[in-house]
Every structure is written in C-alpha cells, then in structure tokens.
C-alpha cells in the first residue's frame, strides 16, 4: 500500500511539473510574440518620426534657398 501511495505521489508530481512546464512555454511564446509586435510598432513609429523630420528639414532648406525663411527661425508659430 505504501508503495502504491508513493508511486501515485511521484506520478502526480511528475504530471504537475510537466503541466507547469507546458504553461510556462506557452506563456513564453505569447510574451515573445508580444515583444516582437511591440518592436515592430515602435520601429514603425520611429520611421514615421524620421520621415516627418526629413520633410521638415527639406521644407526649411527650401525656404532658406528661396529666401522666404524668417531670420530668427521662429516660422513654426
């Protein structure tokens, strides 16, 4: 009887450890996917900011070349 209870306890612990490992792996996969999506979104936002800055710089340069820019640089107000 003791052997049966000991065997049952070991089997139960093995199953619980295995289940916990699967849950951890699933959570890790979900976390990695979310991290990948976050990186992708941040890179897209950074790209848009760079494009906006480049367009602003192009406009400023054109204004300087054409002589339409004001002298103190406060043309954004």
Image (cartoon, helix red, strand yellow):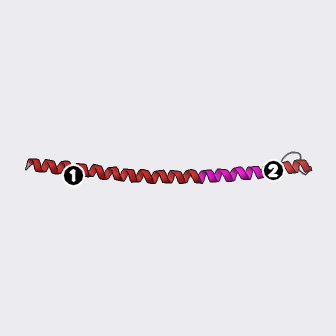
Q: Residue furthest right?
A: 67
Residue 72 is left or right of residue 39, and the answer is right
Q: Percent position (x, y) of residue 40?
A: 58, 52
Q: Which residue was labeled with disc 2?
A: 58
- Report helix, strand or loop for mark 2: helix
Q: Which residue was labeled with disc 1?
A: 12
Residue 4 is left or right of residue 56, and the answer is left
Residue, x 84% and y 46% (percent of image)? 73
Residue 43 magenta-drawn? yes
- Report helix, strand or loop for mark 1: helix
Residue, x 76% and y 50% (percent of image)? 54
Q: CA distance from mark 1 to mark 2?
A: 69 Å
Q: Percent position (x, y) of residue 13?
A: 23, 49
Residue, x 41% and y 53% (percent of image)? 27
Q: Percent position (x, y) of residue 11?
A: 20, 50
Q: Which mark is residue 54?
A: none
Main SS class of the magenta portion in the image: helix
Residue, x 90% and y 48% (percent of image)? 65
Mark 1 nearby-residue class (10 Å; few <14, some 14–19, many ≥20): few
Which residues lie in the magenta part?
41-59
**Of callouts 1 and 2, the N-terminal one:** 1
Mark 2 nearby-residue class (10 Å; few <14, some 14–19, many ≥20): few
């Amino acid at each position: 009887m003791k052997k049966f209870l000991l065997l049952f306890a070991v089997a139960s612990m093995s199953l619980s450890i295995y289940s916990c490992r699967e849950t951890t792996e699933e959570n890790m996969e979900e976390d990695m996917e979310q991290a990948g999506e976050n990186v992708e979104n941040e890179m897209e936002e950074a790209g848009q900011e760079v494009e906006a800055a480049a367009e602003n710089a192009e406009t400023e340069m054109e204004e300087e070349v054409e002589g339409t820019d004001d002298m103190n640089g406060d043309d954004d107000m």
